[in-house]
Image (cartoon, rainbow, N blue to C red):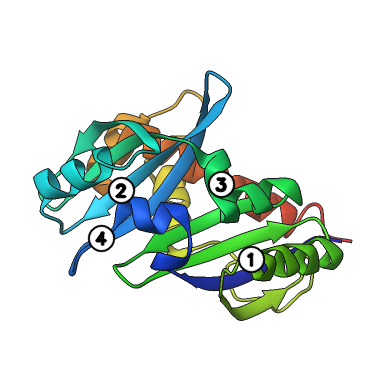
Amino acid sequence: MSVIAEISIPAADFELGRVMKLTPPATAELESFVPVGGRAVPYFWVYNADFASFEERVLGKPTVDAIEVVDSYDDRILYTVDWAAENDSVFRTILGVDAYVLSATGTSDTWQFELRFPSRDAMSTFQDQCQDHGISFEVHRVYNPSEPGQGPWFDLTDRQREALVLAVERGYYDIPRTCTTVELAEELGISDQAVTERLRRAINTLTNNTVLTS
């Protein structure tokens, strides 16, 4: 049975944290991983940063081939980073135990991860391998997503619930549809691609914690 773990890792302890090298008050949020040419290319929202300096720092890292602006607003930019995830001990270990990154947010000091593991044994293997690579982390919460009482919104994040509620209220799931992802994106202040990904994650989480529960 799968388990979800909420953990934090010091930014200096793993490759992506060092690649991003955020400076206060900047923060980053993983939007999605997109397969490109056999590699998993991450899409990140970066908030409240000196964006020109941030781009220069990231592009100067030897493991980064390119950084590209996908979308932008006043205080945030959505980037895609062509980066060798297979060289990062944390992400290599996540892939090795068949875990899935549900969310990841970072600051200059720490990254917070929400990870879904296929079993508790897989989570234990992940912990052991992180320790073998000298990666320190703190576990904040571990729970089984199929157990009742995990919160009033079936473990949807606030952003997932916001997007899903808005989509229903605006008629995105009506036949015929009365709004588009572009219109939802304008209300939420994110890209239409981000809306699609957020709705996909919300429906996946809601289904796993309701329809597929034992």
Residue type at numbered disc 4: Leu
140 vs 194, nearest the viewer:
140
Residue type at numbered disc 1: Phe
Side (left or right) of 181 relative to 148: left
Mark 2 and mark 3 lie on one chain; the one further toward the N terminus is 2
Query: CA–CA distance between discs 3 and 1?
Result: 12 Å
**If the image is split into quadrants, where does the N terminus sit?**
bottom right
Mark 1 and mark 2 lie on one chain; the one further toward the N terminus is 2
Query: CA–CA distance between discs 1 and 2?
Result: 25 Å
Is residue 96 visible in the rendered image? The answer is: yes
Residue that carries the numbered disc 3 in the rendered image: 201
In this view, the mark in front (3 or 1): 3
Residue drawn at (47%, 58%) of the image:
104
Q: Is residue 106 above or below residue 201?
A: below
Q: Residues within 10 Å of mark 2 (few under 14, many from 20)?
A: many
Q: Position of residue 21 (x, y in %)?
A: 28, 58
Q: Residues within 10 Å of mark 4 (few under 14, many from 20)?
A: many
Residue type at numbered disc 3: Arg
Q: Residues within 10 Å of mark 1 (few under 14, many from 20)?
A: many
Q: Position of residue 126 (x, y in %)?
A: 72, 63
In this view, the mark in front (4 or 3): 4
Q: Quadrant of residue 200?
A: top right
Residue that carries the numbered disc 1 in the rendered image: 154
Q: Quadrant of residue 77?
A: top left
Mark 4 and mark 3 lie on one chain; the one further toward the N terminus is 4
Residue drawn at (55%, 61%) of the image:
156
Q: Position of residue 149 (x, y in %)?
A: 71, 79
Side (left or right) of 102 relative to 79: right
Q: Which mark is residue 27?
A: none
